[in-house]
Image (cartoon, rainbow, N blue to C red):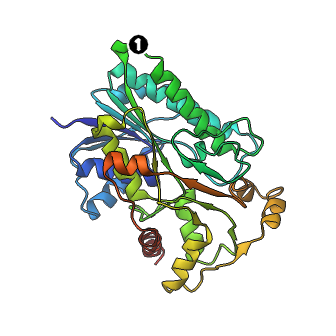
């Protein structure tokens, strides 16, 4: 009998790749959706890509509602909690991001503990590791974003608060009820899409680049990620007990400036791509009025450099080249635009 994994947020960019990686690795996957109407499109996309779907089922869950969690977790050995709201837009009310992230994480963990799940992997982010988000920083698995910093965006706060609650919950369990936890920390994510859904921040940036709708790029640098690498490490973390208790950074070996994807795509013949950086002062001024830009301000004018040695050594993983990641991302997005 196949080991079953509850995967939250299967319709998202990362969630789709995690589901595909799990299915190819021989797991049974129960993927959660907010809208059951997306199930057929996901199954069809997987089948067209050669991903086995016999062991794929779906359920409907809401991060802010108790209904359905106990039933969804039934017979599951593992939990991959990927679902969490994210847009670059800075909301007027930070709870728009914080409540679903924190409450959803706790609902998932409590349901998993009740069901006797033995291992949990949660998708966090590099933005949960940025200190006060007020200066360039060398990131490693010991660094945390200060949610009280005036520079921390609502999304940053949502990720760090959800992760801290998760670790506190896991560490507070009695030995007989113990679960293992690993958190996965990608940077900005590029890569191919299964379904062509581009409403999220990850794929919308690629779409805006190749269609010429992004006139300028923020002057900032951070380690970036390939969605296929991110999914691979989620699954490896389930299998490898040495990953338990770890915060694993899954990103490129060095930080990349946001202008680099544009330069790569321009060199590959995407003629509409703009390769101009926005002056930092202009970005900060526009951030006073434009919610999408305001959400990016903690990165603007800074270089965040992440150490990935623990992930590479522990799991024997080598990141894909950033050029391959960006090129594959653009080709995939373009195929859905044609």
Image height of 49 relative to 159, above or below: below
In the image, residue 180 sits, relative to residue 263, either above or below, namely: above
Residue 50 is situated, as x and y percent measured from the top left of the image, at: 24, 62
Q: Quadrant of residue 79?
A: top left
On-image quarter of the N terminus: top left
**Residue 187 pos. (x, y %):** 53, 54
Q: Residue at x 50, y 28 (%)?
A: 167
Q: Quadrant of residue 260?
A: bottom right
Asked whether, in this view, residue 312 is left or right of residue 239, the answer is right
Would residue 18 be seen by someone viewing this image from the given angle? no
In the image, 203 versus 232, the foreground residue is 232
Q: Nearer the viewer, residue 229 or 335?
A: 229
Image location of residue 158, percent across then percent down:
62, 38
> Residue under circle 1?
174
Residue nearer the viewer, 197 or 215: 215
Is residue 15 shown left or right of residue 293? left
Whether 241 is drawn above or below 218: the answer is above
Place residue 242 in its image quadrant: top left
Residue 230 relative to residue 305: left or right:
left
> Residue sitting at 69 percent across and 75 percent down?
215
Q: Secondary structure at mark 1?
A: loop
Give x and y (percent) for residue 119: 34, 31
Crowdedness of circle 1 by 10 Å Cα count: few (<14), some, many (20+)? few
């Amino acid at each position: 009998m196949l080991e079953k994994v509850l995967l939250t947020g299967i319709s998202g960019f990362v969630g789709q790749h995690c589901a595909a990686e799990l299915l190819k690795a021989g797991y049974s996957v129960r993927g959660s959706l907010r809208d059951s109407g997306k199930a057929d499109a996901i199954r069809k996309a997987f089948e067209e890509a050669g991903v086995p779907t016999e062991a794929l089922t779906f359920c409907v869950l809401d991060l802010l509602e108790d209904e359905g969690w106990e039933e969804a977790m039934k017979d599951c050995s593992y939990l991959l909690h990927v679902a969490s709201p994210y847009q670059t837009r800075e909301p007027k009310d930070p709870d728009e991001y914080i409540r679903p992230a924190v409450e959803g994480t706790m609902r998932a963990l409590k349901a998993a503990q009740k069901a006797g799940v033995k291992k949990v992997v949660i998708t966090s982010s590099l933005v949960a590791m940025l200190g006060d988000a007020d200066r360039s920083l060398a990131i490693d698995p010991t660094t945390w974003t200060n949610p009280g910093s005036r520079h921390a965006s609502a999304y940053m706060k949502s990720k760090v608060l959800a992760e801290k609650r998760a670790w506190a919950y896991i560490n507070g369990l009695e030995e007989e009820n113990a679960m293992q936890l690993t958190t996965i920390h990608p940077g900005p994510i590029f890569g191919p899409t299964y379904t062509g859904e581009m409403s999220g921040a990850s794929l919308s940036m690629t779409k805006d680049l190749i269609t010429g709708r992004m006139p300028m790029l923020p002057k900032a640098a951070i380690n970036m990620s390939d969605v296929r690498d991110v999914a691979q490490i989620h699954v490896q973390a389930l299998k490898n007990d040495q990953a338990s208790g770890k915060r694993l950074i899954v990103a490129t070996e060095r930080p990349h400036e946001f202008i680099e994807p544009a330069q790569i795509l321009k060199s590959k013949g995407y003629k509409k791509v703009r390769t101009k950086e926005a002056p930092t002062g202009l970005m900060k001024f526009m951030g006073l009025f434009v919610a999408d830009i305001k959400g990016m301000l903690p990165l603007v004018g800074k270089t965040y450099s992440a150490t990935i040695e623990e992930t590479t050594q522990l799991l024997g993983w080598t990141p894909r080249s950033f050029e391959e990641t960006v090129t594959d991302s653009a080709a995939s997005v373009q195929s859905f635009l044609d």
